[in-house]
Image: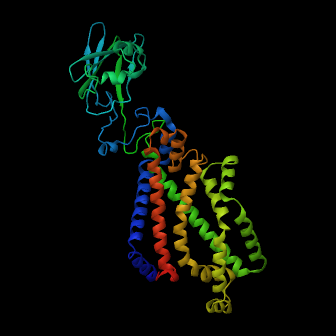
Amino acid sequence: MDNLRASFKKLLMYPSAIVGVFAILILVAVSIYTMITIPYPEAIRLWRGGEEVWYQNPKFAQPAWVNLFSSKKYSESFAVDTADGEMTKTATPGKNDAITYEMVHEFDFNYDVYPQDMILYLKSTFTEKQPFVSIELITPDERTIRIANFVIADKYTYRFSQDEKLRLKLRTEEVIPALFSDPETETILKGTYKLIVIGTTFEPDAGMDAEFVLHGQVFGLAGTDHARRDLTLPLLWGAPVALAFGLMAAIGTTMLTMIIAAVGTWYAGWVDELIQRITEVNLVLPFFALLIMIGTFYSRSIWVILTATILLSIFTGAILGYRAIFLQVKESMYIEAARAYGASNGRIIFKYLIPRMIPLLIPSLVQAVPAFVFLEASLAVIGLGDPVLPTWGKIIQDAQSNGALYKGYYYWVLEPAFLLMLTGLAFAVLGFALDRIFNPRLRDV
């Protein structure tokens, strides 16, 4: 414990190490928060749900915070519903069991870019007589635009931009810009708009609700992708996946490598020879190519890839370095004393040989984490990541498949890339500081 306290005090002498520890703690806190607030089954449901789950979101929307840095203000997305009171609904009884519902929503539009689309989702309950709906839009200059009139079923979706009759009425090819423009100047008309939906039912127990969605150019903290998915979800869940994969691979690889090297060094003879021959064969095997083959022909499960990564990373050059150190430790006086009082082979290996390697083990373990994090992301980028999990590499792979960089959706690539670099940098600077603390040759460098 005294040695740990002393090492921790030395660690505080390196500002880069403090920054690295702080970044790692943030990643750990985000991971814990994500797993608590968005449980794994819910995360998978949302990620694989597609447009059925994310219908309220616009496609290819930039993060909302870009408006803070842009001279041109992009339109923001929103959704309101009569069921939760965000869109007002008034019912007026009429003759012969008829009921007229007036559903109204006022919204301010003070942006420099037109929205992508406006959509109205209507729900009704009836037995035989279908309800009738009419839609109007009142502009800031007090013009009333009659949008449409139609009969609806129990569920009905009306997309403003796809109404051919409205396009002919407005005499334009682009409905949304026409609705939000001054007819004289043909520029964006800013101010308060009012959407009025009037629905009439013709049965005593009939009802009606409406949900109004405006798809803007920006949305949320991270934007959206081609399937309208909020990128905040995979960015958050990418943290626990990356940390778990990196830490488990680093710990498993480093510990098993050290144990095998200790066993081979202590027993020597054919055991040591076998370990060295396996190491020599493994060194010439194409590591990444083997993982690609496993992912292509067997399974892309993250657990299969993790197991294969650990097994292929045990017999590497590190085992030769550990062996060289263990050969020196094996001839130490305290090892001779342990032999003299009859300590077993297992006790000598795990109580006397391996503990001497702990100071050198910690820095190498920390420095190995980013390599495995990048490995998991690299496999996902080339399409061999876990098909179920939302990860940083999967975001980049989707962005590449949809030509994000060619279409100007830079946020789609830069956000996961930044988190990958932050994770790698945090563990790297911490590992360098630990190496200077535990490695005597580097203390005065």
Could you tell me residue 330's position as x and y percent? 66, 86
Q: Is residue 132 visible?
A: no
Q: Quadrant of the N terminus?
A: bottom left
Q: Quadrant location of residue 75?
A: top left
Could you tell me residue 388's position as x and y percent? 56, 44
Name the residue at 31% across, 22% down. 179
Say how many tags the image has.
0
Between residues 263 and 366, which one lies in front from this camera angle?
Answer: 366
As drawn, the residue found furthest toward the top would be 96
Between residues 194 and 211, which one lies in front from this camera angle?
Answer: 194
Between residues 395 and 262, which one lies in front from this camera angle?
Answer: 395
Residue 1 versus residue 284 in the image, above or below: below
Residue 154 versus residue 346 in the image, above or below: above
Q: Please state if 147 lies on the left or on the right of 433 as rendered.
A: left
Could you tell me residue 42's position as x and y percent? 47, 43
As drawn, the residue found furthest toward the front would be 185
Name the residue at 33% across, 45% down. 65
Q: Is residue 136 visible?
A: yes
